[in-house]
Image: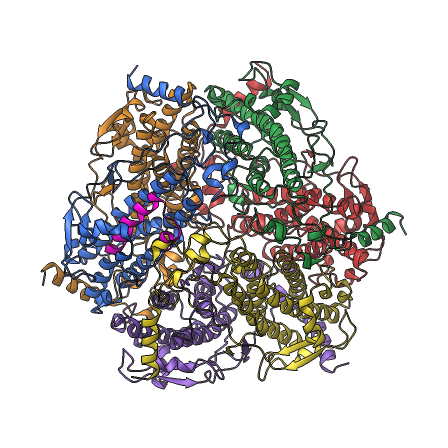
Chain colours: A blue, B orange, C red, D green, E yellow, F purple
Amino acid sequence: MIVRIDKLQIEMPMPQEPAPEAANAVQELLGGRFGEMSTLMNYTFQSFNFRGRKKVKPYYDLIANIATEEYGHVELVAATINGMLTGAPNDDSKDGEMDPTTLPLASVLGVGNPHHFGNNGASALVSNALGQPWQGDYVFNSGDLVLDLLHNFFLESGARMGKIRVYEMTDHPIARAMLGYLLVRGGVHQVAYAKALEELTGANVTKMLNIPNISNDKFPETRQYTEQGTHRTLYRFSPDDFKDIDKVWKGPHPEDGQEVFVQDGPPEGGQAADHPEEPSVYAPGYDPDELAEIAQHMMRGS
Amino acid sequence: MIVRIDKLQIEMPMPQEPAPEAANAVQELLGGRFGEMSTLMNYTFQSFNFRGRKKVKPYYDLIANIATEEYGHVELVAATINGMLTGAPNDDSKDGEMDPTTLPLASVLGVGNPHHFGNNGASALVSNALGQPWQGDYVFNSGDLVLDLLHNFFLESGARMGKIRVYEMTDHPIARAMLGYLLVRGGVHQVAYAKALEELTGANVTKMLNIPNISNDKFPETRQYTEQGTHRTLYRFSPDDFKDIDKVWKGPHPEDGQEVFVQDGPPEGGQAADHPEEPSVYAPGYDPDELAEIAQHMMRGS
Amino acid sequence: MIVRIDKLQIEMPMPQEPAPEAANAVQELLGGRFGEMSTLMNYTFQSFNFRGRKKVKPYYDLIANIATEEYGHVELVAATINGMLTGAPNDDSKDGEMDPTTLPLASVLGVGNPHHFGNNGASALVSNALGQPWQGDYVFNSGDLVLDLLHNFFLESGARMGKIRVYEMTDHPIARAMLGYLLVRGGVHQVAYAKALEELTGANVTKMLNIPNISNDKFPETRQYTEQGTHRTLYRFSPDDFKDIDKVWKGPHPEDGQEVFVQDGPPEGGQAADHPEEPSVYAPGYDPDELAEIAQHMMRGS
Amino acid sequence: MIVRIDKLQIEMPMPQEPAPEAANAVQELLGGRFGEMSTLMNYTFQSFNFRGRKKVKPYYDLIANIATEEYGHVELVAATINGMLTGAPNDDSKDGEMDPTTLPLASVLGVGNPHHFGNNGASALVSNALGQPWQGDYVFNSGDLVLDLLHNFFLESGARMGKIRVYEMTDHPIARAMLGYLLVRGGVHQVAYAKALEELTGANVTKMLNIPNISNDKFPETRQYTEQGTHRTLYRFSPDDFKDIDKVWKGPHPEDGQEVFVQDGPPEGGQAADHPEEPSVYAPGYDPDELAEIAQHMMRGS
Amino acid sequence: MIVRIDKLQIEMPMPQEPAPEAANAVQELLGGRFGEMSTLMNYTFQSFNFRGRKKVKPYYDLIANIATEEYGHVELVAATINGMLTGAPNDDSKDGEMDPTTLPLASVLGVGNPHHFGNNGASALVSNALGQPWQGDYVFNSGDLVLDLLHNFFLESGARMGKIRVYEMTDHPIARAMLGYLLVRGGVHQVAYAKALEELTGANVTKMLNIPNISNDKFPETRQYTEQGTHRTLYRFSPDDFKDIDKVWKGPHPEDGQEVFVQDGPPEGGQAADHPEEPSVYAPGYDPDELAEIAQHMMRGS
Amino acid sequence: MIVRIDKLQIEMPMPQEPAPEAANAVQELLGGRFGEMSTLMNYTFQSFNFRGRKKVKPYYDLIANIATEEYGHVELVAATINGMLTGAPNDDSKDGEMDPTTLPLASVLGVGNPHHFGNNGASALVSNALGQPWQGDYVFNSGDLVLDLLHNFFLESGARMGKIRVYEMTDHPIARAMLGYLLVRGGVHQVAYAKALEELTGANVTKMLNIPNISNDKFPETRQYTEQGTHRTLYRFSPDDFKDIDKVWKGPHPEDGQEVFVQDGPPEGGQAADHPEEPSVYAPGYDPDELAEIAQHMMRGS
């Protein structure tokens, strides 16, 4: 089971220039075959389904622990999309009350994913950049540890490509902040699975990196993290468990040769997202003041 | 973000009678439209995407907190399926080494979901009882709070029906243990969303319960939980957040009239699942002793 | 728009021997690519979307009129499936109240489509024999009349094959009654589209029949209809419209050479289905007597 | 079974300004999860599959009757899409004969749904605004009457949101005419299911309305219908059946407190759609004059 | 089994004006229901699955032989798409090394299929113009020869419509070169299946042609092929097999009345596609010179 | 383009014991995510889409050449399924003419995939063991050569697991003959991609093999091929092209250390499949003698 800390893994800028078309491109990183839902769910189910976990505990711990981090990556990508959608409608509401005859959603007709505004409340979907839903059969879990790790190494490599491609499409500041962090963290997972395969098979898998063969150095937003050693850190996302991840996550980082290390507990993190109301899609309601009044009434316990 | 506690929400029996056909029926509760992946992902994305959350914080807190509990429900259903699949192959392996010519998987040909053994390692899939993958478009998130809560109330009602139907199909002890607990916990969520709607709309939604109109009393495995008051408890699944769930979760329980209450922190929980090796599908590997040796070598740090 | 006459197109036997596996086979005729949902929806949307309909009114009338008949075919296949599912659960209910601990659905575990009982109330799904949902892209509607008619002729030919294959799988009396009628009516539509193509292109398309090359004579249940001339009758399913179908539906029937003809109005039809309650899936409710009392109360208007 | 009256439920304006992008947005109301195909098929199959219908006849009648009305809603939305697509191609045809080298479809490249022109004949698809086909598993039919009615109430609420969102996207006169009528009729169904739940459960469900919390008053195109009492009228769409719908559809309307009532027979309705030929997609044929000549020949019976 | 000749079926122009939106329209001809993957796979599986093939060898030979040609059609359409995508990114790479901060993919954001650049390397997808994947259930194979041939005749007719519609959308020279050839070759297959049906059923199916009723004469790019008699040629795509195709492919061509004939062996063909590197998507790699060096090293065998 | 040689890659036994349930298990190897359609289509499209192919010709040649071999693997798996389905119906036909009232398909009701007999003519489907169609988005083609090769290495590893699992399910002689050959050939492709990655990255990828860690020695049916050196042979499937595959396929085989080598041309192969008629599904027709007569008539050219 899990407990939730209502913070994002980093402090995210939430400026207000809408970018609904680019937000749709970012959806690939959430619900695409190589998006964060896929990394979250692959590792989560591999950990739930792990057989003989005590015999090979460092590997179980590694997969379960990375799974836990991925939850926060999905959260970060969702926050990015929401931030990029904010303000995209033509908001002509007076006193928070939207008038449908003013065509508040005409500004997004034919732009990006029509479900962002037609079905959702200007918010992230569990789908890819084509609007196709994430699917449970994106999860691979053969039970054979080497094969599952090979899959995970491939999945992280595909995911890294996806992030780079989105980086090439948009310089929206929210997207770039997210990408800077996730390129580094995805890199950690890619190296971790490479190291796991090395131990198990004797093949020097880390020598294949980078895949794709572009260093994180090429992406300026990664630098603050590299300087802090974030690319060498594996956080242990559990109060008492997964303590044997350091049996795999050890030795030199393949790119800079410095020692990698485990840090107990999640990263410090940044503030939780606080997405503003969006009257055009009556989120959280058509009459938000009335809602707020009800809520205040409840808070006073009366 | 989350941290993970490597325990199941209850102590689960893990007896060894295989039941692969019934395990397939249980898949509906994991990956069906009304399964636990759906409750987890609906509430998780509703919380990620929530607009104006500070204005109506008790509702945000409620949805985010229930989302967090659902993770453990997915985990519990996966453990159930894995337990019911254990031992289903004809295991003729000698010294842990499987001989494919002995047809170890012939025993499951035409039984249940062929991917349980043909693709996975005798383990849970992210799909329903027909083998159809869970899909991201099972997530509903209009942004309109009342409509989303109405959806959640309906989703919990459909989920309750699904659990009852599986109960009627199998009395496998692992399945029944899981169902006893989840009928109670799902009931809590159903009541919670009903109460949330009552506060917001003034309609006495709890009067519609039970849906379906069968009391948990009819399911003997629920009784220990009802006696402990589990049906009236909302756990707060966060160290420091979601503190305003008690603004919604208060007042009498609609079935027994006793006061409902919030308990800080997750339930005590039971041991993590420890699924045995399954040589027929070489999980975790064809030569588990060699794997174990590698792992021990790693544990010694040498 | 339509009005509904609450009768089936024929008098259907509703004996009570359950046959859930065969009922699943019949699903192909409801929700398969060549099932009745496909004929209904292809012709319905072709009629809604028809351009220049006044110029070629006999063809518009033909397609729209056949579309209308197909609704009753879907209804008939659904009634068949429901009839074959009736009684499949182990009904140990006392006074109509089901006890879940008696495992009423264990009798259908691993038999047929698990959603018949796990999700639906022992009733027809909008899916095929594999449980895959009917899909809107089964509808073909190019706008080109000759191409659309060619499609329809092919669709009816595929549909006829489907019915014959199901006939070969089961002799359940409900299924056979439905098949006897629909083989004849589907044959009418196949001939009608062949005649339409003949008029438009000059090719003697009816000469291709039968497709598949098996006469309805081989199916004893068709005989009563052939003797009544049902295979030569096109019903006009409208009070005031579609009057030009007789411009296409005329001339000899390709199999017996007798003249075909139009009959105004729908067939006499038989009683509406009246499927019994099924306590195991609490259809229509867990406490049917209470429901009935509410309903009687309403009927008395008090 | 049904008979068809070849009229739309209202008199529809069919002006000729093309709006293919907005037409694609309207597709959500036809083939989306909350579109008219979903309301049609949910209620139709619930009526086909209803068990114990005589015991609770008012509810059976209500669901079957609303199902029948929905057919005309699908028809109306299809006519809307077809009207908005009319004229979108660059029609340079001379004497009705299209010259493909003039690129008649270049004007719609990258606009809206490419299948509207690439596969269909400038006409409606059975899919949503993303081009995803309507699916049979959008139908919910548990057999449990209360749960099915709760679903229907939720479905109508989601459908109402969808219509409002499309309203906010376009002020095309055809779309607005359709929306004005369907917001009113959808509202009738939402209230009807709320009243049905009230009778069965005793909970005052109508108090939850409006969902979303926006009155139809905000949409000027609804006013003529409200003034005529259309929002309080339930048409009985059958010559002889469904006579007990007045046992549910009675009492005050929740918004204006006036009495609701049943009207026997369908609405008066307006002319059937008469979509013009579209030479660019050779609908109904590449040489429409030749087609017309064949048809006239047939009409003369020669 | 097959052997591959690394040539396209015609000499293709590969000019460099990018046209990513039109390339997406061309995808329908590759992965749509009526695209070349469908013709390839329908005929291929019909040939693999053919029962009693010796008894009716000319038909087996015909289907298997046309199947073989279709492979080259898929290849041609893929080459077309790749050619139209070439150069669409903003290539600011220096010395072949791409700098992601220059936003090389911003130029394709919101244009065409986002997977062309976000997932693939500026290259063809196995999907249709909506980005929906080609699916194995597009294959129809009843086993009944007449029905399968009728399907194939219909499939070719739908495919011809699809090509014409794309022709109407774009005059990109690569697309037009491909369409000119494939309209002619698709026409051959349409006539071949018509002739096969004529022999088997006695109906004069060729009289239905053209479907759609537009002559290839209307498409200037077809003329060179018609003048060479390509529309009357069936190539025998096998060194030693399928020799009885001339039992079906004989007699007059329905459009010009000239004799059709079989030519042994594949067409002469044109050069294989040689798509240039695309640094923005690091195809074939981020550092192509390093790759080339490795390859040269290998070529020297050192 | 390709030419087809109407032979299977090996001589296949075609005994007549039906095994429809096991045939369904074999479908996973045809249309599953890791089946032969996936290997065929991944490598085929990677070769069609390859950018800069001349610069890194050995890799282009390798992928294109393996793609060509895979066609014959699909063919072999289809022949296997067809062989295992032969005779499964209750054939009571007299003189080849089937009587539907004898229920010839009752013997397969509820066994395996209902579409094998209900839709197809006792023949292979383009779908997996769950009846889910093969999908075009199983194709991965990033354009980045290292990433695509890593994918291919993973795909072959997943494919090998799939074959082993089916081996464990059935000892049907047709299935075993196919598996013996394809385990060896799949192994060749796995090693080939490993060698390709080694050259490009310097990592000793072959050291990871076997994946799964089970030697082909454990499968007796592979031995004849290993003894002949088939596991070390890469056939060059082209008359004149792909000549640089020997730049990659060279050096020792990782399992036995013997030198690998290229053989020009396809393997000798065995007879084409000759599946018997199946009257129950009227394949190739309901009256096969009439069909044969027509064919003979054609053969005589009269």
Q: Is residue E160 visible?
A: yes
Is C211 or A258 nearer to us in this picture? A258
Q: Position of residue D105 (x, y in %)?
A: 64, 53
Query: What percent of the width, then of the height, locates residue F107?
Result: 54, 60
Q: Quick one: quadrant of the C terminus of chain C?
A: top right
Q: Which residues are magenta?
A: A165-189
Q: How many marks?
A: 0
Left or right of residue D108, residue B193 in this image: left
Q: Which of these two is toward me, E209 or F72?
A: E209
Query: Which image quadrant for residue D176?
Result: top right
F157 over C94 or under it: above or below: below
Residue F215 is drawn in which quadrant?
bottom left
Q: Looking at the magenta stretch, what is its main secondary structure?
A: helix
Residue B260 included in the magenta stretch of the image: no
Q: Is residue D194 above or below residue F197?
A: above
In the picture, the quarter occupied by the N terminus of chain C is top right
Q: Quadrant of residue D127?
A: top right
- With respect to residue E217, does F185 lie above or below? below
Asked whether, in this view, residue E274 is left or right of residue C55, the answer is left
